[in-house]
Image (spheres, rainbow, N blue to C red):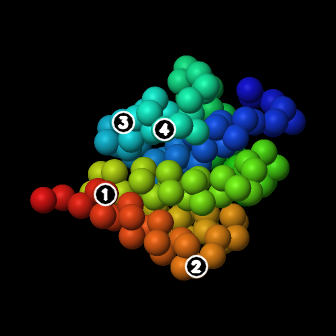
């Protein structure tokens, strides 16, 4: 898993994106980690995925983020290994993790903007995904 030449599974890519969103404000909050864990354990896209792989993917993401070009390297891996049909799913999961703690830090907002750009998401589709995440994570 630590060799960047090895392809990641689509699910590894989704997990990596959720982890980088959680880490974007330099604090991986419990609510965000629980959101990632719940997604991996309950969503159909992760049906055959081994939840124990999350730790290895986390290690890979942290190794990448320690590099000067880490975020660019991560996006290169995502473009290489994540099927385009899952780009909106990836963005939805990223938005859910960002919204999980009830606040969106500037770093998270900038990263979501970068994800939209890197995955070439349609602005209207992205806005709908963002609205859904906001609605799901509204506090009473």
Residue receiving disc 4: 43
Near mark 4 (Cα within 10 A), the count class, few <14, some 14-19 or many ≥20, is: few
For the residues marked 3 and 2, what is the alpha-carbon distance in whole angstroms? 28 Å
Left or right for 90, reference 24? right
Residue receiving disc 2: 123
Please state, as top left, top right, bottom left or bottom right, where the C terminus lies in the image. bottom left
Tag 4's secondary structure?
loop
Near mark 3 (Cα within 10 A), the count class, few <14, some 14-19 or many ≥20, is: few
Label drawn at residue 136: 1
Q: Residue at x 78, y 45 (%)?
A: 81
Judged by depth in the image, the label closer to the viewer, 4 or 3, is 4
Q: Residue at x 42, y 53 (%)?
A: 96
Quick one: label 3 or label 2, which is nearer the N terminus?
Answer: 3
Evaluate if marks 1 and 4 touch, with contact meaning CB atoms under 8 Å apart. no
Quick one: label 1 or label 2, which is nearer the N terminus?
Answer: 2
- Report which quarter residue 75 is drawn in: bottom right
Evaluate if marks 3 and 2 touch, with contact meaning CB atoms under 8 Å apart. no
Q: Where residue 48 sits in the image (x, y, percent)?
A: 61, 25
Residue found at the far left of this picture: 140
Quick one: label 4 or label 3, which is nearer the N terminus?
Answer: 3
Residue receiving disc 3: 34
For the residues marked 4 and 2, what is the alpha-carbon distance in whole angstroms? 25 Å
Label drawn at residue 126: none
Left or right for 41, reference 50? left
Nearest the camera: 48 or 133?
Answer: 48
Q: Where residue 34 sits in the image (x, y, percent)?
A: 36, 36
Quick one: label 1 or label 4, which is nearer the N terminus?
Answer: 4
Q: Where residue 33 sits in the image (x, y, percent)?
A: 40, 37
Nearest the camera: 4 or 34?
Answer: 34
Judged by depth in the image, the label closer to the viewer, 3 or 1, is 1
Q: Residue at x 58, y 39 (%)?
A: 45
Tag 1's secondary structure?
helix
């Amino acid at each position: 898993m630590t060799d960047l030449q090895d392809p990641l599974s689509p699910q590894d890519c989704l997990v990596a994106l959720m982890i980088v969103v959680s880490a974007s404000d330099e604090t991986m909050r419990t609510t965000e980690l629980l959101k990632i864990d719940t997604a991996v354990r309950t969503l159909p896209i992760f049906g055959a995925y081994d939840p124990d792989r999350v730790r290895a993917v986390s290690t890979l993401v942290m190794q990448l983020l320690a590099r000067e070009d880490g975020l660019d390297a991560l996006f290169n891996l995502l473009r290489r290994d994540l099927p385009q049909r899952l780009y909106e799913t990836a963005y939805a999961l990223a938005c859910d993790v960002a919204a999980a703690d009830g606040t969106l830090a500037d770093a998270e907002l900038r990263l979501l903007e970068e994800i939209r750009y890197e995955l070439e998401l349609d602005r209207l589709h992205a806005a709908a995904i963002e609205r859904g995440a906001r609605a799901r994570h509204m506090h009473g």
